[in-house]
Amino acid sequence: MITHPTTSPTYRKAGLKIPPDSAERYGFFRPSEEVRQAWEETRRFAQALQARVIVFQCPPSFGETPENMDNMRRFFRIAKDTGFLLVWEPRGDWHETTIKSLCLELGLVHCVDPLERESLYGQPQY
């Protein structure tokens, strides 16, 4: 609900039914009440599990656009001071310099499949 639009199979697999008139307010770190609530729920679950890390895996359709980068900046301004290690896995088309810059700016660890490439920013390597 934070990273994926409602067209993602993830919603169907989870049994989530989103009203069609609000579908555009979900995913892509949108500055919406729906994404904010999804973050609060994620944070509560992570705290209950005593997790230290939260991974934000984005769909391939979440590419490098000014809107997506602005949405990330708004979202992580709120999320970054919660005591979790925040990890971002961009799977869309992103330039390496942009990934590094956003990770540095937003305090994120860059997540990759280690069998395919190296992480560009952050510790631990994830």
Image (spheres, rainbow, N blue to C red):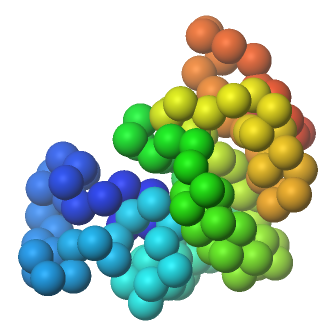
Identify which residue, 98 or 54, lies in the foreground.
98
Residue at 22% x, 73% y: name it.
Answer: 23
Residue 114 shows up from this direction: yes
Farthest bottom residue in view: 33
- Please state the total of marks drawn on the protein image: 0
Residue 32 vertical position relative to residue 1 in the rendered view, above or below: below
Residue with the most extreme front position: 66
x, y percent for residue 15: 12, 64
**Which quadrant, please, contains the N terminus?**
bottom left
Quadrant location of the C terminus in the rendered image: top right
Residue at (62%, 33%) from the top-left corner? 94
72 left or right of 23?
right
Q: Nearer the viewer, residue 86 or 29?
A: 29
Can residue 124 be seen here?
no
Q: In percent of the image, x 16 and y 69: which residue is there?
A: 16
Q: Horizontally, is 52 left or right of 34 in the view? A: right
Q: Position of residue 91 (x, y in %)?
A: 51, 33
Residue 21 position within the rendered picture, expressed as x and y whole percent measured from the top left: 14, 82
Q: Residue at x 68, y 13 (%)?
A: 117
Placement of 117 over or under 37, stated as above or below: above
Q: Quadrant of residue 121?
A: top right
Of residues 23 and 108, the one nearer the viewer is 23
**Image position of 78 (left or right of 121):** left
Indicate the quadrant where residue 122 lies: top right
As drawn, the residue found furthest toward the top would be 115
